[in-house]
């Protein structure tokens, strides 16, 4: 990956800061998710991130991922986990990523979890560790309210849950 990033840097498509950011994402994937970062799929994902950051830095915009592809990803059973990993990656990037670019980031993370399913298992274990550490009393008293939510469309579940969690609601039914 370093050779590919170096080639982009020599063409002035990215700078040293972007190289450092992409290598940090690579390290995070390897350490926190046990991703095999030597696969071609992961290398392409990292190159895409570098290209996207270079475009953003230069003020260029892309069209979003085709709606059918995005819909397929969002309707996948693993989408909530894909979204979690995606959001953790975004936190490592010191630039605001436009939504159009984020659709491609999501596609790359989706490809990653399909290619390396152990990443999902690692995420499930992390979630399980966090949730099993609480007693029923702790769960019930951790929030002043416990909203009961009926979701009609799966695509609405994650954005709604994310908004509630961002607002401080920690328990949802």
Image (cartoon, rainbow, N blue to C red):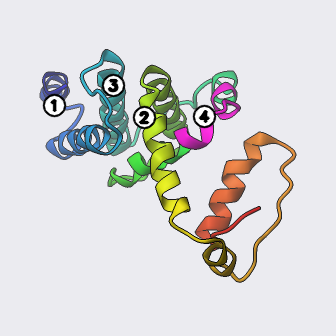
Mark earlier in primary sequence (4, 3) = 3
Query: Which secondary structure lies at badge 3?
Result: helix
Q: Which residues are magenta?
A: 72-82
- C-alpha span from label 2 to label 4: 11 Å
The answer to whether 134 is drawn above or below residue 109 in the figure is below
State the image coordinates of residue 58 (x, y, percent, origin top left). Answer: 33, 41
The answer to whether 173 is drawn above or below residue 84 in the figure is below
Query: For mark 4, what is the residue?
Result: 78
Mark earlier in primary sequence (2, 4) = 4
Disc 2 vs disc 4: Cβ atoms closer than 8 Å?
Answer: no
Mark earlier in primary sequence (4, 1) = 1
Mark earlier in primary sequence (3, 1) = 1
Specify whether 144 is left or right of 89. right
- C-alpha span from label 2 to label 3: 13 Å
Query: For mark 3, what is the residue?
Result: 42
Residue 77 sits inside the magenta stretch: yes
Relative depth, front residue between 135 and 85: 135
Count neighbours of disc 3 (C-alpha within 10 A) and say few if under 14, some if 14 to 19, many if 20 or more.
Answer: many
Query: For mark 2, what is the residue?
Result: 119
Relative depth, front residue between 53 and 131: 131
Mark earlier in primary sequence (1, 2) = 1
Query: For mark 1, what is the residue?
Result: 9
State the image coordinates of residue 22 (x, y, percent, origin top left). Answer: 25, 39
Dividing the image into 4 quarters, which one contains the C terminus?
A: bottom right
Count neighbours of disc 1 (C-alpha within 10 A) and say few if under 14, some if 14 to 19, many if 20 or more.
Answer: some
């Amino acid at each position: 990956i370093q050779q590919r990033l170096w080639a982009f840097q020599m063409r002035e498509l990215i700078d040293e800061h972007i190289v450092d950011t992409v290598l940090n994402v690579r390290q995070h994937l390897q350490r926190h998710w046990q991703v095999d970062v030597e696969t071609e799929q992961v290398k392409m994902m990292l190159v895409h991130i570098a290209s996207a950051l270079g475009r953003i830095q230069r003020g260029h915009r892309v069209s979003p991922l085709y709606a059918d592809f995005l819909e397929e990803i969002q309707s996948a059973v693993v989408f909530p986990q894909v979204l979690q990993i995606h959001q953790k990656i975004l936190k490592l990037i010191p630039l605001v990523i436009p939504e159009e670019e984020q659709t491609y980031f999501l596609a790359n993370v989706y490809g990653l979890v399909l290619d390396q399913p152990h990443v999902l298992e690692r995420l499930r274990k992390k979630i399980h560790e966090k949730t099993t550490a609480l007693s029923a009393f702790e769960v019930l008293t951790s929030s002043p309210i416990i909203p009961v939510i009926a979701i009609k469309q799966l695509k609405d579940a994650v954005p709604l849950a994310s908004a509630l969690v961002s607002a401080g609601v920690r328990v949802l039914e």
